[in-house]
Image (spheres, rainbow, N blue to C red):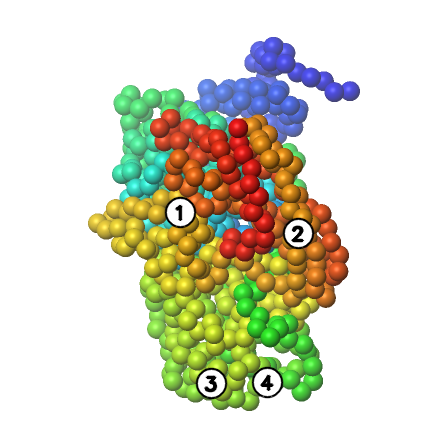
Amino acid sequence: MRVVFNKKIALLIFIFCLQTSFFNAQDNIPKIQFPQGEITSVVLEAKIDSIINVLTLEEKVAMTHAQSKFSTKGVERLGIPEVWMSDGPHGVREEISWDAWENAGWTNDAITAFPALTCLAATFNPELSGEYGFNLGEEARYREKDVLLGPGVNIYRTPFNGRNFEYLGEDPFLASTMVVPYIKGVQKNGIAACVKHFALNNQEHLRDKINVEVSDRALYEIYLPAFKAAVQEGKVWALMGAYNKFRGQYTTHNKILNKILKTDWGYDGVVISDWSSVHSTKEAALYGVDMEMGTGTDGLGTTTNNHYQHYYLANPFLKALKKGELSEDLVNDKVRRILRLIYRTSLNPNRALGKMNNKEHHKVARKIATEGIVLLKNEDNFFPIKDKKGLTIAVIGENATRNMTQGGGSSQLKPLFEVSPLEGLRARYKNAKIIHTMGFESGASVYDEVVPASLNQDSLYVKAIEVAKKADIVLFVGGLNKSHHQDSEGDDREVFALPFGQEKLINGIQEVNKNLGFLLLTGNAVEMNWLPKTKGVIQTWYLGSMAGHAIADIVSGDVNPSGKLPFSFPKKLEDNAAHSFGKLSYPGIDENQYYKEDILVGYRWFDTRKIEPQFAFGYGLSYSSFKISDVKINQKKYSENDKIKVTFNVSNTGNREGAEVVQVYVGKYKSKVKRALKELKGFTKVNLEKGLQKTASVTLNVSDLAYYNTEISSWSLEKGTYYIYVGNASNNITKKIKFSIL
């Protein structure tokens, strides 16, 4: 029997509870399972209000700032627990010391490293994103965390951004679609996902100083949709502010937090500052940040006795409240959100115990890795490479053995193991002979300091050429790594080309051995003048614990590649929209930066300006071949509340099973406002055995074709003629269909 509660009944229950000991917050907070439905939130909110009423002002303030590097205080006398947080988006970070950034030295905090989020985005598989989130959430739960500081959804604007590897690509629809199941998966474990960094944190260079100026259209159409999806569809419980300024005000305590996030979107979770991103007590109190982390007394990493009491939301906040300079309602709202977080996490009676480093997690990590790897070039069917006796494969490159889970800033991990590309290939190829040499050495880095290479680069080069001469096939394993000025937090890349003399080495190898393939390990696009010298190129990303096995799965053909690029690869840096406008657009001048490309980010820029990319958004090859045919829409004329159903046939015309990602873009013909030629509005991944055909569909909401109208500060659906574009990459369209919105 289902009991339906209305608001009057809920109110009567609430009044009854107030008259009983149920809401006596001076007792330990009861771990109760609330009923489902409307009554749940009513009772919970009433309980939270009753707790706030008996908290002292000092206790309230203490809950709004850190007590250690990764935790905040509870209230022991009332049984309110501490809140424990951990980086990061693709694995639970090792334990950090209470009051310093050093490793705490635990021996039981090794975890499964999952692939970085660029790889997840490249799967174009929302279901797999849910598996990713759930398995990662299990590991966070096992480590007794309450908040997992991820995922990141900042838009890929420039290939120089040091943290692009942590994010979900250049397209707001793709990022929105992939982030929602990730969040839901994490939070099924009673662990809060913390989507970050709100907002416009699209570069690491001068990240704590740069002031971003961007139009409202670009803000709403490009940079906010994934955050909005995380809040309204993913129901995310936590969100992290960013370091940069927006229109002169730091984003961690910017007016848009209250206006857009908490009011317009109805966000009921907590806003956590990025570490050291708070700069003002008054603004932090007024403009939306609920928990201040990492500030110290004079900046990131300070360890002074009782320095947590000097946070902006600590003693200075308490003093302003006691003087009446700030309303107690402000701290009450913050505490209300924190208590809501606690009930959803540590006081959630349905939380399982979690799991860590089990076979299921390793299997999921490997599956994500293989689905996200992108085959970029395959001349003369260079890949897959068969394992046969008498075959000699030379594996050349430092990245074949380099640890890629360490470094990168706050996303660095301490996995139980990390299978290198060389280890994975050797484990898979039992018959062929595999020989390895470094070829180049990159050195290392300690967060923001580069340690130069210690080996003689000329000697490494000569040895690599000698090894290449003796091999039947060469696999060059190169790209970037997670050191400073590469794919790393703290600053951006400084050159678009491959570093450490890799291009010279590729050219030298190709002169002595034409059978050259490249396993490219990066989280960013790189310049590819060397591309004609290779027969095959595989974009492998940073793949975590199971990296080597996943790479070997693709190289050997055990798994057919199906990944698609989540961002465009420009031929030269100036072809990228942000860089085409000069320093004012990137990296900024005098700490001010203007997003002059506006809404034309990524493929929108390439398509609209008719610039040919090196590799397009959505591009990726397979060992099979596919045909998209018989593309239709359900009608030719639509109104605002209608749905557009796009149906099509997908045929596997190759000789083995595989998967194709069918992408649906929409463009407005002769729009009255500036528009991209087309924008991604739907996609589906279709798995097929060889020779088979399947009918599939993608459904679009007509209302989602609106643009942000700055004249009315809201969304407008323009009437008139539109086109649907269906294909398997942004620059490879199979069918274009005209329709109208009335």
Q: Earlier in the sequence, mark 4 or mark 1?
A: 4
Image quarter of the N terminus: top right
Q: Is residue 707 above or below residue 479?
A: above
Look at 70% across and 59% down and name the residue there.
652
Q: Residue furthest left?
A: 590
Q: Earlier in the sequence, mark 3 or mark 2?
A: 3
Disc 4 marks which residue?
472
Circle 1 packing at 10 Å, graded few (<14), some (14-19), many (20+), is many
**SS category of the residue bearing label 3:** helix
Q: Viewer-nearest of labels 4 and 1?
A: 1
Q: Viewer-nearest of labels 4 and 3?
A: 3
Q: CA distance from mark 4 to mark 1?
A: 45 Å
Circle 2 packing at 10 Å, graded few (<14), some (14-19), many (20+), is some
Amino acid residing under circle 1: Leu
Q: Position of residue 4 (x, y in %)?
A: 69, 17
Q: Nearer the viewer, residue 635 or 150?
A: 635
Amino acid residing under circle 3: Glu
Amino acid residing under circle 4: Asp
Q: Viewer-nearest of labels 2 and 4?
A: 2
Horizontal side of residue 70 vs 421, given as left or right:
left
Disc 1 marks which residue?
600
Horizontal side of residue 264 vs 701, given as left or right:
left
Q: CA distance from mark 2 to mark 4?
A: 40 Å
Disc 2 marks which residue?
629
Give the tally of numbered discs: 4
Disc 3 marks which residue?
511
Q: Earlier in the sequence, mark 1 or mark 2?
A: 1
